[in-house]
Amino acid sequence: MELAIETHGLCRTFGDVQAVAGIDLAVPRGSLYGFLGPNGAGKSTTIQCLTGLLRPSGGTLRILGMDPLRDAVAVKRVVGVVPEDLALFDRLTGAETLEFVGRVHGIPRPTLRSRIDELLTLMELTVAANSPVGDYSHGMRKKISLAAALLPAPRLLFLDEPFEGIDAIAAHQIRGLLQSFAKGGGTIFLTSHILDIVERLADHVGVIHRGRLVAQGPMAALRAGVDGGKTLEQAFLDLVGAGAVSSPTLAWLSR
């Protein structure tokens, strides 16, 4: 099995805190891999290590067969990233944002113009193309950020909480685009707290808890392996030790 992402003993510490504690990721090429975990489990730190924003404290990693620490420029040419905070320039318009990304990647002008027009149409951002990104709604900002990540035609996408805070229409559009990207041979590595979307989208899953990878494999195997035939949410809760936790109640709210 050819891997798009491969790590061995990947670690990242912050002082005395070990945010990522020796994880071994194996993400097949062409897969849609859901990387799940509770808040503070180490998901975003892992993505930052994989995308070169943080230097790992230990371990090894390969991205599309390359070492991102030694071949950083080559890796960035074939990888797209949508961080949780989106990292957009609010004073640029949507069209200018894509133009800037395209020029950074050295895309020829005729190709760039064509791709920008296609992406703005696909994301239903044509009307807002000449408005500052700072005036966009949260869902529109998610879409322009995803368009910028797709513009250079990457082979691997890192998406940190792409569905958080967006409406059902935007979520539907993004899901369809990601499925199309994966069917075309691209690999997607995404984090999300919306487990029902991950269950519909992903074919492989990894679960991180307190910095450690507690499960990894095909979606079907993960669900079948936890007392058989559970939903992804049930399997996830069991894996992170929350399956037996009772729901909190407030007596004064009862009538």
Image (tube, helix red, strand yellow):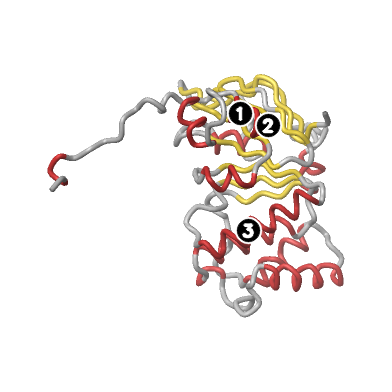
Check whether the beta carbons of the residues at disc 1 and disc 3 lie within 8 A of each other: no
How far is mark 2 from mark 1, CA to CA? 6 Å
From the image, state whether disc 1 or disc 3 is nearer to you. Answer: 1
Residue 97 is marked as none
From the image, state whether disc 2 or disc 3 is nearer to you. Answer: 2
Name the element at disc 2.
strand
Mark 3 closeness class: few <14, some 14–19, many ≥20 residues within 10 Å: some
Name the element at disc 3.
helix
Q: Locate residue 26 relative to residue 246 in the image: left or right.
A: right
Check the picture and name the quadrant holding the N terminus. top right
How far is mark 2 from mark 3, CA to CA? 22 Å
Looking at the picture, how far across and down is residue 25, in whole percent? 68, 27
Mark 2 closeness class: few <14, some 14–19, many ≥20 residues within 10 Å: some
Q: Which residue is mark 3?
A: 174
Tell me: residue 77, above or below residue 139: above
| Residue drawn at the location 80% of the way across and 37% of the way down | 64
Residue 222 is marked as 1
| Residue drawn at the location 64% of the way across and 72% of the way down | 124
Tell me: residue 117, above or below residue 74: below
Looking at the picture, how far across and down is residue 156, in whole percent? 75, 45
Nearer to us in this view, 14 or 255 = 255
Type of amino acid under label 1:
Leu
| Residue drawn at the location 46% of the way across and 30% of the way down | 237
Tell me: residue 53, above or below residue 237: below
Looking at the picture, how far across and down is residue 69, in whole percent? 74, 32
Check whether the beta carbons of the residues at disc 2 and disc 1 lie within 8 A of each other: yes
In which quarter of the view is residue 103 placed? bottom right
Name the element at disc 1.
helix
Tell me: residue 68, above or below residue 178: above
Type of amino acid under label 2:
Pro
Q: Which residue is mark 2?
A: 218
